Image: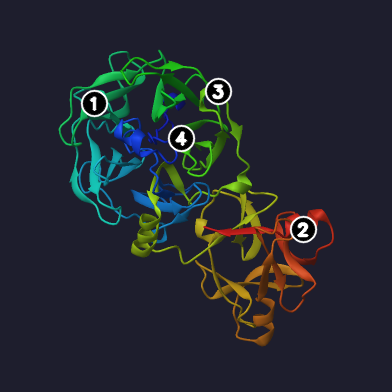
Amino acid sequence: MSARPRSQAMPSRRLFLGAAAATTAALAADLSLGAPPARAADSAYVMGYFTESPNGLGTDYGLHLAVSTDSLNWTPLNQNNPVVTPTAGAGGLRDPFIMRKRDGGFVVLATDLKGTDWGYNSQTIHVWDSADLRSFTHYRRPHLHDMVTHSWAPEAFWDASRGQYAIVYSSVNNSGHSVLMVNYTSDFTTVSAPQVFFDPGYDIIDGDMAVGVNGVNYLYFKSSRTGGLVGARSTSLNPGSFTPFSTSVAHGGTEAPTLVKSLTSNTWYLWGDTYTPNGVFYAWRTTDLAAGTWTPVDQKLYTHPVNAKHCTIAPITTAEYTNLLARWGAPAWNRLKSYNHPARYVRHADYLARIDTYPFDPYTDSQWKTVPGLADSSGVSFQSVNHPTRYLRHYDYQVRLDVNDGTAVFAQDATFHRVAGLADASWSSFRSHNHPTRYIRHSDYALRVDPITTATDRADATFSVGH
């Protein structure tokens, strides 16, 4: 990210309040919070994020959105371009947070910061209202404090005992280290005086909460002591009432915790984001939030949006999911993820096809338009997004990116038939059109078309088609 100390690495935000399918009685008793966790009508999820890539080619500090039906595999909206960008303050955002308000609409909060100018100390945050995340209104920048420091990674929840929303964010108060502060508000415009919400005695950032889970409130944060994500809990929502209790989870240095409750099971997911623009998301799972222990989720099972950073996840209805896709559109391109090397994606480099570890720039090297097969429309051909005159084709059994010369031979070499994954039928494999005993597979990370005979071959020839 920058040379900034890791203890102050840039935060995320997300107080996702989640109990799946909250009952009418629970809602009436205000046991769910800020965004009422999950309502009976919720069946999908929306993610908000900003983007950064290693060399900046995919960097954008506006609000990006993606949708999912399982909270694990995501479809970026608007071609992974922003849907709204701040017009004041730093002119950009980090760490967006989406919450459903008690009136049924949404509020979006975000850090007032563009890029990595850590010396830009904004005492304000960005705020929008939105009825449906298809349009954004009433943009404002509430002033949270008068300290000569920042207001990072704002999130919010409904505090029923106060009859107000709480805005929690990372800042440095008189203690001299980074803590979580809180302001209370009814409208996200006028706010109360700031208070310290959580201070364990050392630097922390990125608070994310699950409120009212079997009478307990959970707060996950990035700990400077462990370099990972740690949980605290309290039976109240009062400032100063939370006590750390969980084991730390991390994949390298990890920040930006996001708690997500499955809408279909008793599973909780904890997402984390590694430092720097080269970072990626990792996920852990548990069926017992009170235990404070987490199991890593196999990377085969999830795919986050390309270049996404510091996400927020909230439940939405089927109608909202459908309407968001209709308003913003799904990507016109796909990415292909390796089955047995799920951190790697198919990309071209020097016009040769291979699988490389994400992230990389140009990230567009891994984006493909899957078009009807050039030799047989029942098959598929892979057209490069950033070299649209070129397609993946095999030549001497090596897969490479060549210009379509219009010949029948090229059309056949560039046509493949998508079949059920040879190692996993829920994935995909691609059989050569003109060499039907051969499939696209990787070998020493380079792509080839080869006969498939062993279990290793089948795994090498299996891919996920996603975004």
Amino acid carrying mark 2 in the image: Arg
Mark 1 residue crowding within 10 angstroms, few (<14) / some (14–19) / many (20+): many
Amino acid carrying mark 1 in the image: Asn
Which residue is denoted by mark 1 in the rendering?
183
Residue depicted at x 44% and y 43%: 309
Residue depicted at x 42% and y 53%: 66
How far separated are the C-alphas under marks 2 and 4? Answer: 35 Å
Q: Nearer the viewer, mark 2 or mark 3?
A: 3
Amino acid carrying mark 3 in the image: Ala
How far separated are the C-alphas under marks 2 and 1? Answer: 55 Å
Are discs 2 and 1 less than 8 Å apart at CB? no
- Point out residue 248 in the picture as x, y percentages from the top left corner: 54, 24
Q: Quadrant of the N terminus?
A: top left
Whichever of labels 4 and 1 marks the residue nearer the N terminus, that label is 1
Residue 259 badge: 4
Whichever of labels 2 and 3 marks the residue nearer the N terminus, that label is 3
Query: Which quarter of the figure has residue 186?
Result: top left
Amino acid carrying mark 4 in the image: Leu
Q: Nearer the viewer, mark 3 or mark 1?
A: 3
Q: On screen, 4 above or below 273?
A: above
- Point out residue 356 in the picture as x, y percentages from the top left corner: 63, 52
* Observer-nearest of 444 and 261: 261
